[in-house]
Amino acid sequence: MSLLFLASVSGAEVEEKPAIPPAAEQEFLRGNALCDAKRYEDAIPCYDRAIEMGLRDHVVWNNKGVALDSISRHEDALACYDRALAVKPSYETAWYNRGNAYAYLGQHERAVECYDKALALKPIYGVALYDKGLALTQLGKTKKALESYERLSEIDATNEVAWFRKGLLLEQLGRAEDAIEAYRRATSLTPGYEDAWNGLGNALYALERYEEAIESFDKVLAINAKNEEAWNNKGFTFFMLGIHDEAIRCYDRALTINPAYKHAWYNKGYTYHGIDRLEDAIVCYQKALEIDTGDEVLWNNLGNAHYNLGRYEESIPYFEKGLEANPKYEIAWNNIGNALNKMGRHAESLKYHDKALELKPDFDYALYAKGHALGQLGKPEEGLELITQSLELNPNYDHAWIAKAEVLASLGRYEEAREAVTNALVLNPTYDEAWIFRGKITFELGDPEEARRCFEEALQSYAVALEFEPGNGEVLRLQGALLEDLERDNEALASYALAAAVGDGPGMSAQVRLLLRKGPVDRAVAAAAELFSKKAADPDTASLLGEALLEAGRANEAIPLFECALAEKPRPDARRGLARALMHVKRFDDALRTLDADDPREPEDPLLRGTILRAAGRPAAAVAAYDSVIASGRHLDVAYFERGRALADAKRYREALASFDAALGLDGTRAEVWQEHGAVALAMGRPRVALRSLERVTDLAPEAASSWELRATALDALGRSEDAARCRARIRGGVPG
């Protein structure tokens, strides 16, 4: 805004006044000259002396007010303008300056009232229209502010500042095309107007006319190569074009000019985030937060970077910092819930999703996330309802379609599930996880060939991604997981190994778990030890190494690792691992106490309890544990099998045989169940029954020497000694008939 002097030596208007003492006029003119020289403190005594000498008209009070405003004594200035208006109520200049004083004090409503008084007296008062527009903008009255600048550009079409301000407001109102026209008028009037060129670039960016936007930012930089804002804006435009290296270069230019430019640090971090250079993104976000610790978006993005690295636990404190900055930041509430979901803490996540929805009831991402959590908690119908609501609000969210497909599949509604996942693929044809899931659903619907094609599509998506970024650990890990699902274990191991080589922690963990499942165990131990050497402080890593050592028969070495993991906080996997390790070293009571350390809520706990009790020679107690698993309705085949073994230990053979029959009714392909069934039948003196069971074993697992020996024993009991001899020859390497 401008402050207007009258009767100044610089040529402003001088009103005709009654005769006044020459000395008073001299003091008045001296005050004006000092104001023109910006010596406001010295000017004020001159005006005071002029007033004392008898010059008390409206102009001297106005000019004294201007001097006071200029040294931020706005309340005193208001008193002077009031004195001027008491002398001459129709004095538009004092009304205008009074408006400026109120604007300086942040009282924009009162400022607008004063500008309106000035404009009522002088309708073509350009500066009053301009500053009224500024005040209205501060009040958030964008449309009213625009009216001021439109009026100003009508009465003065050559006012480039009016066109610039008009452009800004049009942009705020979402009228980017009109804003472009206004900015172009400003730049045509003043080709060196860098703010107008920058505004033009921003408006073109809003319309996704990125190449033209870059041309505008280049115009700014041709005028002023040190315009940090233009470098930053140009950088983000390159990011939107996918030209990431150039984007980073632009941010760096902005930061060279101003190392404390928060937005450039933020955008640089965001760009790194977008290309999965997450560690680099973290550094940039932290730099930005050193400048402004109260930016909730920055805290949230820092949390997201850790989340995307699989550091779910670590991400939560950053989201919480965002909430300290802004407790009503619904995105951070929801993200805490997302992190908890990733950690398997679905029930705990719900209160965070609920808080996000309390703040924003139509928050589509929170509806989806809560729905997904409910599905994981065994409430698929409730989950489906929320995910459907989410998609009604945002039908273009591919992850929500997949979540809907998962819930529908869990309900056995495979056709609907396939339709949902197809919608995800329409939105994102390279969505590898969607192709994988579509393959699984298609297989369930009885079309293995189509399922295979979907899996191959997913693998192709991973391959394309790796062509662009060969060292992307996350993609390598996901590729490995799919290959593992397809039982292409050697290829999966190779993919996990590549992920591990680039430092992808989850990829290294996946490699260890596959080696534990498929062997060799010594490689699993070596891989787990390498991971532990890099992340010794990570309880999950300690627990994983414990698992590998336990599998290798090194239970004593595994015990302190599980204890280390549990020292951090209760962890069901580590608790179960420690219990198993203690069982292996025959510390049965300690093993049972370990299981009792938490309130067991997972069916695996009573399963393991049964295994420990059986190993401790307490078959009756083991049977009771397995019965509790059966009552839960989960893992029935395993529970019936283990129950049968415990009953056999107690020599309750008839019950054992019935339990094995129940297990085989659920899954008839498990060789170990058939073998135990045959062994119990032999113990009961029923060799024919035993032989039928043991023949199934040797069909399913022809290399199992113990089953050939049991089969020979059954044949001997039936008097078929030659057949028995052929079975034993198989064990020695001969060829049975």
Image: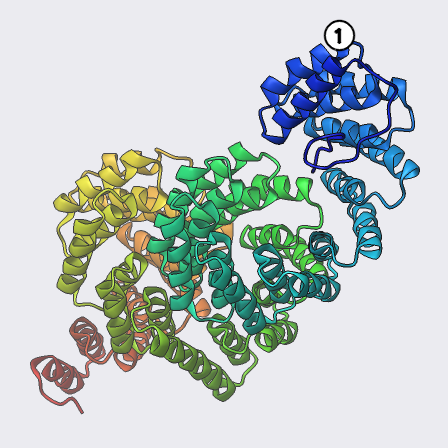
Dot 1 corresponds to which residue?
52
Q: Crowding near pointer 1: few (<14 within 10 Å), some, many (20+)?
A: few
Residue occupying image coordinates x 53% and y 61%: 220
In the image, residue 414 above or below residue 42 = below
Give the image quarter of residue 423: bottom right
- Residue 142, position as x, y percentages in the image: 77, 47
Q: Nearer the viewer, residue 543 or 627?
A: 543
Q: Is residue 2 left or right of residue 432?
A: right
Residue occupying image coordinates x 54% and y 83%: 446
Q: Nearer the viewer, residue 217 or 392?
A: 217
From the image, which quarter does the C terminus lie in? bottom left
Give the image quarter of residue 640: bottom left
Q: Amino acid at mark 1?
A: Glu
Residue 685 visible in this rendered orientation of the protein: no
At numbered mark 1, what does the secondary structure look like: helix, strand or loop? helix
- Residue 83, position as x, y percentages in the image: 83, 16
Residue occupying image coordinates x 77% and y 20%: 60
Furthest-top residue in this view: 52
- Residue 246, position as x, y percentages in the image: 40, 67
From the image, which quarter does the N terminus lie in? top right
Q: Is residue 733 left or right of residue 550?
A: left
Furthest-left residue in this view: 732
Q: Is residue 262 left or right of residue 540?
A: right
In the image, residue 241 above or below residue 382 = below
